[in-house]
Amino acid sequence: MAHWLKILSQEEAEKSDRHEIVVEGEIIAVFRQEGSYYALDGLCPHHQGPLAQGEVDGLVVECPWHGWKFHLDSGCYAHNQSMQHTTYPIKLEGGFLWIQKNPKED
């Protein structure tokens, strides 16, 4: 079952257009772009490069290590739309950013 997790205060989120945070043991990259927030797995699937440190152009982030590009809104690889990186629903509510994740299976 999905649940929402509080990840950042709105005040902290607005200090930068990107954040790298750890949520339930996973690195999550959070971006503020064009007035909206986006959250995706923070590690590039190619060689685990830190996506939150990559260049952003519009709604596309480029991995700083080897240049793989992903759409922030869908997670799709920019050069092959059938390949998709993990994204998370994100919302701003009550002065905090929240992401939705599925609990880990025991």
Image: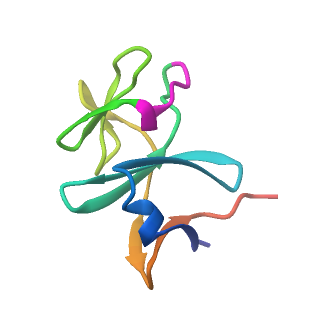
Q: Residue furthest top?
A: 66
Where is 22 relative to 96, above or below? Answer: above
In the rendered view of the protein, which quadrant contains the C terminus? bottom right
User: Residue at the location (38% across, 51% down)?
Assistant: 16
Rendered residue at 39%/72% (across/down): 91
Which quadrant would residue 71 be assigned to in this image? top left
Q: Which residues are magenta?
A: 47-53
Location of the N terminus by quadrant is: bottom right
Along the line of sight, the residue nearer the viewer: 38 or 79: 38
**Residue 47 drawn above or below residue 96:** above
Horizontal placement of 53 versus 20: left or right? left
Q: How many marks?
A: 0
Instruction: Please provide percent x and percent y for residue 72.
Output: 31, 46
Q: Quadrant of residue 92?
A: bottom left
Residue 6 on image: x %, y %: 57, 71
Q: Is residue 105 left or right of residue 10?
A: right
- Residue drawn where x is 43% and y is 69% of the image: 11
Camera-nearest residue between 16 and 79 = 16
Q: Is residue 44 magenta?
A: no
| Image location of residue 48, percent across then percent down | 55, 25
- x, y (%) of residue 31? 36, 50
Residue 50 belongs to magenta span: yes
83 with respect to 99 (left or right): left
With respect to residue 14, does 65 lie above or below? above
- Rendering colour mode: rainbow
Judged from this view, the residue extending furthest toward the bottom is 94
Q: Residue at coordinates 44% horizontally, 38% vertically from top-left?
A: 52
